[in-house]
Amino acid sequence: MNWPDDPSSPASVIPPWNVAGFRRQYNAWVADETMEDYALRYAPRSFRKWSEWRIANTAIGSLSFLIMEAIGAMIVVNYGFANAMWAILVVGLIVFLTGLPIAWHAARHGLDIDLLTRGAGFGYLGSTITSITYAIFTFIFFALEAAIMAMALQMLKGWPLPMCYALSSLIILPLVIRGVTFISRLQTWTQPLWLFLLILPFVWFALSRPWLFRDFVEFTGAHPGGGFHPAMFGAAAAVVFPLIVQIAEQVDYLRFMPPPKPGKQWRWWVALIAAGPGWIVPGMLKMAGGAFLAYAAMQYATPRQQAMEPAHMFLAAFREIFGLPGLAVAVTVLFVMISQIKINVTNAYAGSLAWSNFFVRLTRGHPGRVVWLIFNIFIATLLMALGIFDAFERVLGFYGVIATAWIGALVADLVINKPLGLSPPGIEFRRGHLYDFNTGLCAMLLAISAGSLIHSGALGEMAKAFTSFIVLGMALIFSPLLAWATQGRYYLARRPEAAWQPGERIRCSACGHAFESEDMLYCPVLKAPLCSLCCALEADCRDRCKTNAGAAEQLHSLWRLILPRGNFRIALYLAALLALCAAGAFLLTMAYFYGEAEIPSSQLLTSLLKFFLLLALPATIYGWYMTKTGGRQRGAQQAQAQAESQRHLLSLLREIDTRQPGPPAARAPSPETPDEDTWALAATLPAALRETLLRLARHGEASALRQRLQEARAEHPGHLALLAQLEGFVDRLDFQALIRSFVPEEDD
């Protein structure tokens, strides 16, 4: 596909916005980049000061998470050695291959996973769904890791488990507030001791009891037949597949990689692979190690359920090594605490980035990354209290469908669409240049829909076991097909107007701060440079720099293809209803996985389906309310924008008159312009009515003005001519004329 230019911009026909005296102010948290870490921005070259090895060491520090050992233990106990090891190897290879292009683009362009997803096929608003997907990953794994830490604390102190949950969460908060700067130091300080305690049990067993490794290879677990079985392999792989999203956490650090230096590119590539897709290599070893430790713990009288918990499997190993129960408990708790702190600072940090990106697009506000850090930790604590560790196999199996569809669609754009020319080169992440939705989001949703059906067992148990593989294949196919079908038209909404040099520092006209050119864009509405964050937070411009690129316009175009003569309000209503039902279905699905172990699945499923139908009843009503409210808000915003444009135009005309030499030329009065008779008649209206009409006119509330004027006709039949003239002003959205009917000296 030929990409000579991006789509043309309507900038030349956009009147400039009146921003005199306006400056966007950020709070102290947002202004301090040592805390903010460019949560919503491109990571500039000036901030990427660390060496490749320090960034790699920081990213590799996240490999301490003990849920890897728990996953390995769980799948080997349930499915046997052969099925578990093949699942680890095959999924590990897939994780490496999908992670490599993501890591390379993130490090090259200085973008986190959300900004990367925006420009790689999902669109500006489309990537909000992937932000939620990523945020769910971070707080699920934060909760799992903190639960492991809480079990270790309870083992040491005997405190109530809820208290241990709270302590395991709160201890992370002060460590993450300062961002990647402190996290990098923490990972460096704790790395040697963590590695020593991690490797010690395996070295001791290899030297003193090597026969356990031979017996472990023959372990069949709960699989009585032993050997390889496709359904068992698929079920084990489904639990490992959610780890495909871990590359997003690695990218949160890799975006700070310095550019490769001439003659030393090999160092950059080694660090990139080690800290990026290469994380899965030690991850696979940790899963296999957890499987072995669980088997070894069961040989030393540890109950099967406890043997799958990392704290107890390492406790059994250290008890054999040291021979002193008290020392073994202390070393186990020390190891678990170090491991979980190392990983949960990454989970909490990544979650704060994901929530920041999600809410800035929904609320057009950004209180700071620290606010969303607290929010993420609070959700994780609730999940721990709900007992997520007991249901993590079922939760991860369902989450893997969503995660695999996202990563599959993202990788398809990077390795298929861009090389084939189905999408433009480069990664564009700035709101002013993007469509709200793109084909990658459609590919992801199609794959999730098909995957959910397969995961439910509708196509049989064998297909259910291989759901994640099928979903990944669908995402890889759907993304290029949709990009080809649409000719890549939904990637870029307009052509960049400014030709700044790479790395050039440009001052933002809204916030007054200077940023590198990659983080800046020229705003045709402001007629001035604007940084990407100020562009994302701007709520009044209504995307006037782009044509038919907003969510409503795109939905309208799709609706016209389906029903050319259909009412567009029905489309908005159906979209709102579908979103509400999807959110309710997701929450009830999570409830099903939590309660499946305690309540018969058929009885629980029937109850939840009835509850979903009950929730659907108010959703049908609230969806229509959302549609009506949104329509009124859009009408009011359009009226306000029109009034602002007219105010600015009148101001310009007045300035032209004052600058012309000689007396100003007299203008013929318009029949629609208020005169002295109009002022006299308007003065006879009740004061309350005049104040109401003035207030509504100054706020541009066209719909409310029409309704109040119609009511006034019945209340004041003697003023019908005046009220009709005022309605004419409202119909033309000439709010200034209506205001001058009551206040002739009102300043334009």
Image (spheres, helix red, strand yellow):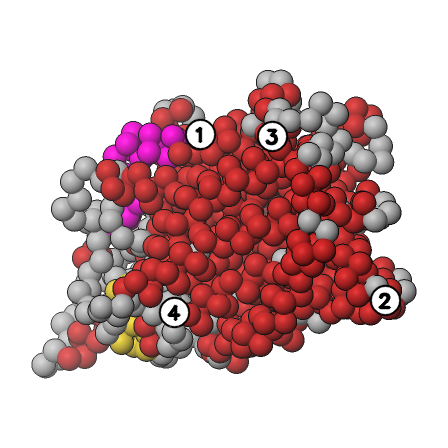
Report the front residue among 647 and 732. 647
Position of 90 compared to 106: left or right?
right
Task: Name the residue tied to disc 2.
Answer: 324
Mark 3 surroundings: few (<14), some (14-19) or many (≥20) residues within 10 A: many
- The answer to which of marks 1 and 4 sits earlier in the sequence is 4
- The answer to which of marks 4 and 3 sits earlier in the sequence is 4
- The answer to which of marks 2 and 3 sits earlier in the sequence is 3
- The answer to which of marks 3 and 1 sits earlier in the sequence is 3
Contact? badges 1 and 4 (CB < 8 Å): no
Q: Amino acid at mark 4?
A: Glu
Q: Amino acid at mark 1?
A: Met
Q: Amino acid at mark 2?
A: Leu
Report the disc number at residue 300: none
Question: Measuring 78% from the left and 34% from the top, which residue is drawn there?
Answer: 596
Task: Name the residue tied to disc 1.
Answer: 474
Task: Name the residue tied to disc 4.
Answer: 52
Q: Amino acid at mark 3?
A: Phe
Position of 205 compared to 260: left or right?
right
Find residue 392 and report its horizontal and vertical position in percent: 71, 44
Indicate whether residue 678 is drawn in magenta: no
Find residue 415 and report its horizontal and vertical position in percent: 32, 42
Task: Name the residue tied to disc 3.
Answer: 233
- Gap in angstroms between the C-alphas marked 4 and 2: 42 Å
Question: Where does the magenta region start and end?
Answer: 477-494
Contact? badges 2 and 3 (CB < 8 Å): no
